[in-house]
Image: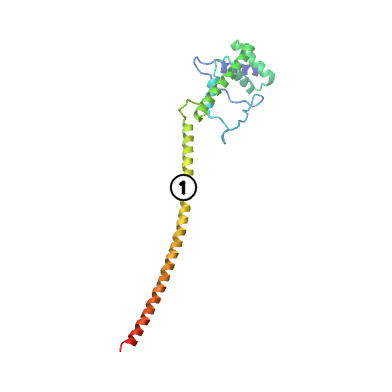
Amino acid sequence: MAILDNLAKAAKDFFVEPDGEVPAAAAPRVAGPLASPTPPLAGLPPGTTQPEQRHLDHIAQVLAGDGKDFGAFVKMVKSLAASGLSGPLLYQTAFNAFAAVTGTDLPTLLTSANALAQKLADDRAQVLARHREKTGENGPPGKPGALVQLRERETRLQAAVASLTQQLAEQSQQLTDTQQQLHQETSKTQAALASYELAHAAAVAELQTHQQAAKSLLIK
């Protein structure tokens, strides 16, 4: 029967592994009732829609077990779901196969599920702690991380730019005022020179007039 063939294949794929080999990463999601898309997360950078492979590998390593835990059971469920099983029959068939191969009862299996959930929670707590240390939210006193140092440098440069901008504005205003003063003084100087030239020309003309008169009238 097809179900028995799939059952045998699932058992071979997920419960017979070479000694010392780490179980493979979880199989791709299966369309149907088992497909439970990851809920959207808030605060992600724009364009972030898929996890990096290194993170998928890390999670797979966190969930890696001995082939007798809930992770192996999930692999069995996914394998049987790929063959068309669903609903209660899927889980009952998977559990019967799992229990037959591993000797695990249901309470132990569910305890294993809780243990895996706790492993994921603990791993996330560690990752978030490292993240907070990198961003400066938490970390050894007196030892700022790279992001903290960059933020401090950014703050200093912003302050320096603001100061230079203020100085530039002040210097620009001083330049404008100086140019206006220069224009005014130049105009006054040129006007004074023109006035002097007029007075000088008038005096020369008057002197020449009187000089010519004296020569013509006084010299016999």
Relative depth, front residue between 60 and 138: 138
Q: Residue 203: name its quadrant.
A: bottom left
Is residue 61 depicted above or below 189 in this figure? above
- At 69% from the left and 20% from the top, the residue drawn is 87
Is residue 211 depicted above or below 133 in this figure? below
Report whether 216 appears left or right of 72: left
Residue 23 x/y as whole percent? 53, 19
- At 42% from the left and 68% from the top, the residue drawn is 192
- State which quarter of the image contains the C terminus: bottom left
Relative depth, front residue between 181 and 113: 181
Residue position marked by numbered label 1 in the rendering: 167
Residue 179 x/y as whole percent? 45, 58
Q: Amino acid at mark 1?
A: Gln
Residue 85 x/y as whole percent? 66, 21
Is there any visible trace of residue 24 in the rendered image? no
Q: Residue furthest bottom?
A: 220
Which type of secondary structure does the marked residue at label 1 adopt? helix
**Colouring mode (rainbow / by chain / secondary structure / one colour):** rainbow
Q: Residue furthest right?
A: 88
Q: Residue 207: name its quadrant.
A: bottom left
Relative depth, front residue between 126 and 105: 126
Residue 175 x/y as whole percent? 45, 54
- At 36% from the left and 80% from the top, the residue drawn is 208
- State which quarter of the image contains the N terminus: top right
Q: Residue furthest front?
A: 218
Q: How many marks?
A: 1
Is residue 164 depicted above or below 120 in this figure? below
- Near mark 1 (Cα within 10 A), the count class, few <14, some 14-19 or many ≥20, is few
Report whether 206 appears left or right of 129: left
Q: Residue 142: name its quadrant.
A: top left
